[in-house]
Image: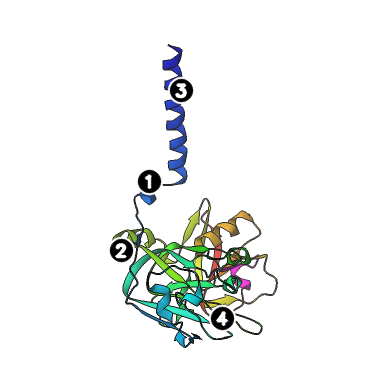
């Protein structure tokens, strides 16, 4: 009898825990499956190309299916010294992207990938496309041969995937041993991104946000906070955590920069900046 009661208790506990997990992670998300997109044969370009023993370390080496991490073995791309090195692949058509992985080199100089930004979108000018995830950290770049993953949150419909590093000092070189792109079914993507493409409003509890300016940023040298967030919704959520202090925010699509302000609508001063959007927080009551 005691054994039966214990089994029933264990079963009840598992059901309870499973219920909590479902509450935090909706089953609809679990049903979506990522599949690796075959990039071989697609058109890849980069800002410049370095040579090793007379062999071009060209952009297509990042999509050849060879994940070896030694650039001396001609398995990795390599640019010349540039102030803003970049790499790009044309997927040939729109795809619903969920995750992008960069394979860093291992033979040397892996720290050069620090600060790299992965972007995805439909603009041929890669710097007009939104960032997937946050820039590569120094800790991530310090691991030789690391597979560094970038989650596109929200999902993005894109034809172009790119990697770039904006260097403020002497410049640097970009080396990629492989770029792995994973996609969802387009139907799943359209359903998942429908709310995010409307721009306004985002609503949580008694507060909502309204899109005030597109292609502009707030001009104010004293933001409450400057963060990097994966989406405009998360920027809004962080604003709400500050309760009655945060009344407006701007968000830069290409970098994920989220700046929070205590400035209300009538006092806002804005200036042109492509890819930036300004939101105000209002009460629905």
Residue 150: x, y in percent?
A: 48, 64
List the residue tagged with mark 3.
9
Residue 108: x, y in percent?
A: 58, 72
Which residue is situated farthest in the top direction here? 1
List the residue tagged with mark 1.
27
List the residue tagged with mark 4.
173
Q: Nearer the viewer, mark 4 or mark 3?
A: 4
Above or below residue 270? Residue 211 is above
**Would you identify the image quadrant in which residue 228 lies?**
bottom right
Q: Residue at x 43, y 80 (%)?
A: 59
Are dots 1 and 3 in contact, CB under 8 Å? no
Which residue is situated farthest in the right direction here? 222
User: Is residue 22 visible in the rendered structure shown here?
Assistant: yes
C-alpha gap between disc 4 and disc 3 = 59 Å
Q: Nearer the viewer, mark 4 or mark 2?
A: 4
Q: Earlier in the sequence, mark 1 or mark 3?
A: 3
Residue 103: x, y in percent?
A: 48, 67
| Secondary structure type for disc 3 | helix
List the residue tagged with mark 2.
186
Drawn side of residue 144 relative to residue 54, left or right: right
**Would you identify the image quadrant in which residue 242 lies?**
bottom right
Q: Which span of residues is magenta-colored? A: 256-268
Q: How many marks?
A: 4
Q: Earlier in the sequence, mark 4 or mark 3?
A: 3
Q: Nearer the viewer, mark 1 or mark 4?
A: 4
> Which quarter of the image is occupied by the N terminus?
top left
| Residue 262 is one of the magenta-drawn residues | yes
């Amino acid at each position: 009898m005691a054994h039966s009661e214990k089994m029933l208790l264990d079963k009840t506990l598992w059901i309870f825990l499973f219920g909590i997990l479902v509450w935090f992670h909706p089953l609809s998300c679990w049903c979506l499956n990522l599949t690796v997109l075959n990039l071989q044969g697609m058109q890849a370009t980069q800002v410049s190309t370095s040579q090793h023993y007379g062999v071009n370390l060209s952009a297509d080496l990042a999509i050849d299916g060879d994940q070896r991490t030694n650039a001396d073995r001609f398995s990795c791309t390599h640019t010349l010294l540039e102030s803003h090195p970049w790499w790009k692949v044309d997927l040939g058509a729109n795809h619903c992207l969920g995750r992008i992985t960069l394979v860093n080199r291992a033979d040397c100089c892996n720290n050069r990938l620090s600060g790299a930004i992965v972007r995805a979108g439909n603009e041929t000018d890669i710097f007009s496309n939104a960032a997937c995830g946050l820039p590569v950290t120094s800790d991530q770049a310090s691991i030789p041969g690391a597979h560094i993953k970038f989650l596109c949150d929200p999902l993005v419909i894109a034809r172009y995937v790119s990697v770039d590093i904006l260097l403020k000092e002497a410049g640097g070189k970009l080396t990629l041993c492989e770029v792995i792109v994973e996609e969802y079914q387009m139907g799943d993507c359209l359903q998942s991104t429908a709310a995010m493409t409307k721009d306004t409003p985002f609503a949580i509890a008694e507060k909502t946000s309204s899109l005030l300016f597109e292609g502009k940023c707030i001009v104010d040298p004293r933001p409450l906070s400057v963060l990097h967030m994966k989406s405009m919704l998360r920027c809004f959520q962080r604003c709400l955590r500050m309760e009655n202090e945060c009344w407006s925010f701007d968000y830069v699509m290409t970098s994920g920069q989220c700046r929070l302000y205590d400035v209300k609508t009538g006092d806002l001063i804005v200036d042109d900046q492509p890819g930036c959007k300004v939101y105000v927080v209002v009460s629905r009551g």
